[in-house]
Amino acid sequence: MESLVTCNSQVIIVADPDRIKGNQAMSEALEGGCLCGAVRYRATTQPMMVGNCYCIDCRKSSGTTHCTHALVPDTAFSATGTIKFHDRPADSGNVVSRGFCPECGSAILSRNSGMPGMSFIRVSSLDDPGAVEPQMTVYASRAPAWAPLDRSKPVFDEMPEGGPQAVVADL
């Protein structure tokens, strides 16, 4: 079953949520927080999409080879504590706002001006990162040669035509 989400006058086709983690439906909320505990959050819906990104900004903001993001509507995301944002233009020209704990620096989420109303939760900040599974990889051409890429899922050298949501719709 697919659903439609309207986002900034765009219609995005979202994959069947049962496919977010294999064929198992995720029934519980996603919860997570920062390293020091000053920020806690909860997402009350299943991710619309989960993906790995090897773009330079994701690499630098994560301190490792990539970031894994779980996309949820802002209306399903709530947090306690202060989240500070750093804004930076992406290749697309959209502004990506990366949210982190101002006390310990842990990355919590990102927002993209091209997809208003959506939060990209950093899977590394989840209490149980195994609750979700990436469906694709983007910007693989920017990954270090030694980084293992999961080729059992779609892998794109850059951002795919139509964005990740187009790929998820075809899964």
Image: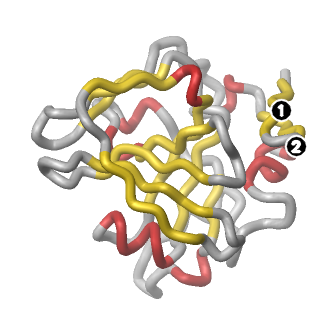
Q: Residue 33 location, x and y as percent?
A: 26, 34
- The secondary element bearing badge 1 is classed as strand
Q: Which residue is mark 2?
A: 10
Q: Is residue 116 above or below residue 106?
A: above
User: Residue 152: image x %, image y %?
Assistant: 64, 57
Query: Image quarter for residue 116?
Result: top right
Q: Is residue 130 left or right of residue 140?
A: left
Which color scheme is applied?
A: secondary structure
Q: Amino acid at mark 1?
A: Thr
Q: Could you tell me which residue is drawn at 24 percent across and 51 percent down?
A: 106
Q: Nearer the viewer, residue 157 or 161?
A: 161
Which residue is pictured at 65% across the width and 53% down the height?
A: 113
Q: Percent x, y for residue 63?
A: 29, 69
Residue 92 drawn above or below residue 29 = below
Q: Quadrant of the C terminus?
A: top right
Question: Does dot 2 land on a helix, a strand or a loop?
Answer: strand
Crowding at dot 2, Cα within 10 Å, few <14 / some 14-19 / many 20+, comes out as few
Dots 2, 1 in contact, CB < 8 A: yes
28 lies left or right of 126: right
Q: How dense is the environment of label 1, judged by Cα within 10 Å: few (below 14), some, or many (20 and up)?
A: few
Residue 72 location (% of width, % of height): 58, 32
Question: With 166 as the anchor, is 44 left or right in this view?
Answer: left
Amino acid on which the number 2 mark rests in the picture: Gln
Q: Which residue is mark 1?
A: 6
Looking at the image, which residue is at 48% across and 25% down?
A: 77
